[in-house]
């Protein structure tokens, strides 16, 4: 990837270009912004461009340096990312090879917690930053998800940040800058990254052949991605999408007609689905309401190409006609709360009963109001 081809991050890239052109590169940068919006891609593209044999920041993609950078095998460009402490060096190399090939870095290690350990910082950053560049001109260290550094690792890195070696750029990326020690953050120049629009996510998915998206899948994944290419790719890799019809039935109350069926459904969701699936279901519920809002705001014709539930237009239209924006806003808040509750390991039976009940009450209120309006 070259800097010029990165989408939706003009501000961040503009700042880097300006620093390079005025020869005022910082020794350390903190790329901060939501997950999966291109922080790591930009960091690697910047590292490649700095070392490109061509003039300026072109990152030509054809010189020897660029080709090595793209294969993640450049001796002066070091990518460090969180892995389980038990991972062997050979397994880590395998991950890198897979990343270079697929454009996707595996972040799910099941039950094992991924960290950036002090040993990794010592061997991959401290030791290597004290060597001269092999090919030059720049040594670049990219620490992806730097907030996953252990305290010891962060303290060790801090010493390098305080006395930065020559011709070295250290780039930390994070979606949680507050989880990094203030002492580390204060040594870095901050570069903000923005959320991506749905169409940009779709464009990025289609632009990178390594990701292997066709148009239909790119559209569905981008609708679920909430502004993050990373989320879109992960969603797609997790296999077939949750059945949208099932979610639609849930949203219009076909599965929760009375209190007994509602409790039944909530219990089923709590026991049948794992935590990740529960979160995904709540995301899909949010997207239902988002679709309803889009329909209300833009009308059927303009909204349809942007709807995830375009196969359920009649039900969406019913909801859009029946509910005012306030009620919708309230339900969206409820589903968001439920998602956070699941994240914090709250009891899923209680969470789902509560959210399904809120939805049923809102539907009933709306129906009553409508009844009154019809009567009048
Ligand atoms: Zn080049």
Image (cartoon, rainbow, N blue to C red):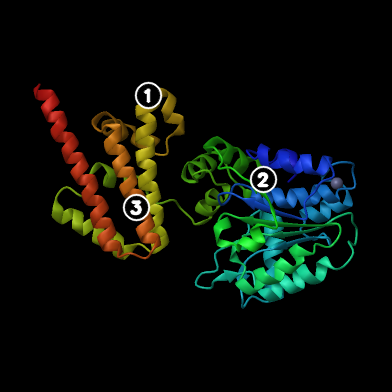
Position in image of residue 273 (x %, y %): 35, 62
Q: Secondary structure at mark 3?
A: helix
Residue indicated by mark 1 = 299
| Tag 1 secondary structure | helix
Q: Relative to the observer, which residue lies in front, 336 or 270?
A: 336
- Residue lying at the far top of the rendered structure: 376
Task: Quickly name the residue at label 3.
Answer: 337
In which quadrant is the C terminus drawn?
Answer: top left
Left or right: residue 347 compared with residue 283: left
Front position in the image: 19 or 137: 19
Q: Nearer the viewer, mark 2 or mark 1?
A: 1
Name the side, left or right, on which 131 lies relative to 86.
right
**Residues at marks 3 and 2, CA–CA distance in whole angstroms:** 37 Å
**Disc 2 C-beta below 8 A from ligand 1:** no
Task: Evaluate if marks 1 and 3 touch, with contact meaning CB atoms under 8 Å apart.
Answer: no
Whole-percent x, y for residue 62 in the image: 85, 46
Circle 1 or circle 3, nearest the eye = 3
Is residue 112 visible to the viewer in this orientation of the structure?
yes
Q: Residues within 10 Å of mark 3 (few under 14, many from 20)?
A: some
In the rendering, at what x and y percent does residue 89 appear?
Answer: 71, 74
Residue 209 tag number: 2
């Amino acid at each position: 990837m070259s800097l010029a081809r990165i989408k939706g991050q003009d501000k961040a890239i503009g700042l880097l270009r300006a620093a390079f052109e005025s020869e005022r590169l910082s020794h350390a940068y903190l790329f901060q912004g939501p997950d999966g919006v291109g922080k790591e891609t930009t960091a690697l593209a910047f590292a490649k461009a700095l070392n490109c044999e061509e003039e300026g920041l072109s990152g030509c993609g054809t010189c020897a340096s660029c080709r090595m950078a793209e294969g993640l095998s450049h001796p002066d460009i070091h990518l460090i990312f969180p892995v389980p402490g038990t991972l062997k060096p050979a397994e880590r190399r395998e991950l890198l090879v897979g990343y270079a090939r697929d454009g996707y870095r595996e972040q799910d290690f099941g039950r094992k917690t991924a960290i950036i350990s002090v040993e990794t910082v010592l061997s991959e950053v401290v030791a290597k930053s004290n060597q001269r560049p092999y090919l030059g001109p720049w040594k670049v260290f990219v620490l992806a998800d730097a907030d996953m550094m252990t305290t010891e690792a962060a303290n060790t890195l801090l010493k390098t940040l305080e006395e930065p070696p020559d011709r070295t750029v250290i780039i930390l990326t994070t979606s949680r800058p507050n989880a990094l020690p203030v002492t580390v953050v204060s040594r870095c120049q901050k570069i903000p990254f923005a959320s991506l629009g749905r169409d940009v996510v779709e464009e990025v998915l289609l632009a990178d052949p390594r990701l292997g998206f066709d148009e239909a899948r790119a559209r569905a994944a981008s609708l679920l991605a909430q502004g993050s290419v990373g989320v879109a790719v992960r969603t797609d890799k997790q296999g077939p999408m949750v059945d949208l019809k099932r979610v639609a039935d849930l949203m219009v109350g076909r599965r929760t007609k009375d209190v007994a069926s509602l409790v039944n459904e909530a219990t089923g969701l709590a026991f049948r689905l794992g935590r990740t699936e529960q979160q995904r279901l709540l995301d899909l519920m949010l997207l239902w309401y988002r679709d309803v809002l889009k329909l209300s705001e833009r009308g059927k014709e303009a909204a349809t190409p942007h709807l995830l539930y375009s196969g359920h237009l009649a039900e969406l239209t019913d909801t859009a006609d029946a509910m005012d924006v306030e009620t919708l806003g309230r339900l969206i808040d409820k589903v968001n709360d439920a998602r956070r509750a699941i994240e914090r390991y709250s009891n899923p039976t209680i969470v789902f009963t509560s959210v399904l009940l809120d939805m049923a009450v809102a539907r009933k209120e709306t129906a009553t109001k409508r009844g009154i309006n019809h009567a009048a």
